[in-house]
Amino acid sequence: MRIRSLPLAVMLTAIGTSLALGGLVAAADTGIFQARRQRLAAAIPEGIAIMQSAARNQANLYEFFVPNSDNHDFIYLTGLQTPGATLVLCPGSEEYPEILYVDAEPGAVRSATGIAHVYPVKNLMRDLSNAYTDYSQLRYTQRRFKPLPSEISRVLYNDGGPKVIYFNYPRFVNLDEPPPERLDLARRIAVFSPKYELRDLADILDPIRMAHDEYAVTQLRQAARISGRAMMECMRSTRPGLTEDQVAALFDFACRYQGATRFGFPTEVHAGPRSLDEREDRPVRVLRAGDLVTIDAGAEINHYTADIQRTFPVSGTFTPEQRRVYDILKEAQDACIRLVRPGVTMQDLQNEALRVLDEAGGYGKYFFWGTSHFLGMEVHDHGNNLAPLVPGVCITVEPGIMLPEFTVILEDDVLCTATGYEWLTEFIPREPDEIEQLMQKMGIVDAIDLE
């Protein structure tokens, strides 16, 4: 039996051991962003790169984006969240390898980013206009009195080779909407002369962002810990009569209580039978005894998000059939996680999940989505889904079985290492017995009486 008589204040103190207050990871030091920019610059074969920060500017037809999605590349390289700023990288220049245009106090920006050359945004178009002039046409006086744009022009000149400018184009687009404002600069560059070759910077930056550095891994571990503890609190507190929205609010509260202030995507809770054509605006369901409930959620820490799912019985006990199907799915997920290592592909993981599900009774036909996606600054982070995994890549492993009677989904976050994998969310109960035992313990909801 669950205890339901403790005062709320006492209850919150009691659960403090499992939801220990965990603030945000300390802000990254300057060296982290410097190392990232140097890694990117070393990968640029020729020319310069222009990276513009941007506010959210398009509703997307495919991916869910948080407000900072369009700005994540800029944040990744600078640590700044300032819309309207521009970073110019000149790998071929010793004097001006990094130039930042931003409307902020230059000294503070230099200290925060490690970028030596910081100028007001109003200088950007003037400097790029001067740099646009072919270096062979610049007189000595121009080079002397306009050293910065002259140096950009020199790097672009490339002694008669391709004059290349890498630009941060959007990765996902909605052609039915007006183009993002930052594309105006790319259009201007292309209109004035055909000699400049514009290339997409994402082709170089995506593989770099895909293999997380130690700072990023630290944030992912923290996001996983916070999200996992919140998931466990939901298991303790779930009972018949709650609504899906109440369980979602409970997850969000538990994450915020631990220090998270944002989420990688809106928390989703689904109870009872599900269908592929289920609309987002469907009526909120009340949790009933005998139903299974699935929570899909992830806290965001310093722009890195977790993404986890657990399915468990509303009543606290699996039926024999629910347990049988659940064990089959768990076996498929175990097999996929054990497969994670450098050289494995996303298709390998998909094939492994389907193999186990089919061999266990033809359940592959009830698995309708992909087993894995990249995880990082986006819940569906950028990366090459066709390339083999490399150390530092973080993925989800999320097979599922969607039957007419009920749905079972398990999703965990797994880091590919040099020798195999690190299972970031392994501590969250998955064994049916462990889940049932956890659900018998008191949770936050047991202390709340607002009726």
Image (spheres, grey):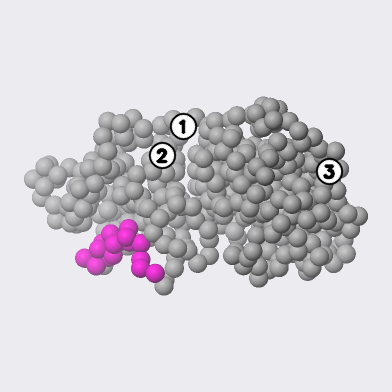
Residue 98 sits inside the magenta stretch: no
Residue 221 percent coordinates (x, y): 61, 37
Which residues, given as a range, are shown in magenta?
177-192
Percent position (x, y) of residue 335? 79, 51
Q: Which residue is at the far bottom? A: 176
Query: Reading the chain from its start, which is encountered first: label 2 or label 3?
Result: 2
Q: Residues within 10 Å of mark 3 (few under 14, many from 20)?
A: many
**Element marked by disc 1:** loop
Q: Which residue is mark 2?
A: 79
Q: Earlier in the sequence, mark 1 or mark 3?
A: 1
> What distance separates the C-alpha of mark 2 from that of mark 3?
43 Å
Pair 1/3: label in front: 3
The dominant secondary structure in magenta is helix
Query: Residue at position x 42%, y 44% from top?
Result: 75
Q: Nearer the viewer, residue 434 or 170?
A: 434
Let me know if residue 184 is in the magenta part: yes
Identify which residue is drawn at 75% across, 40% down: 236
**Amino acid type at image mark 3:** Glu
User: Residue 280: image x %, image y %?
Assistant: 60, 64
Label 1 to label 3: alpha-carbon separation: 39 Å
Residue at x 40%, y 36% (from the top left corner)? 34
The correct choice, above or below, for 118 with respect to 326 in the image is above
Q: Nearer the viewer, mark 2 or mark 3?
A: 3
Count of picture labels = 3
Quote the CA–CA distance across marks 1 and 2.
9 Å
Q: Position of residue 225 (x, y in %)?
A: 64, 37
Look at label 1 and name its amino acid.
Ala
The residue tagged with tag 2: helix, strand or loop?
loop
Q: Residue 436, labelled with which disc?
A: 3
Q: Which residue is mark 1?
A: 27
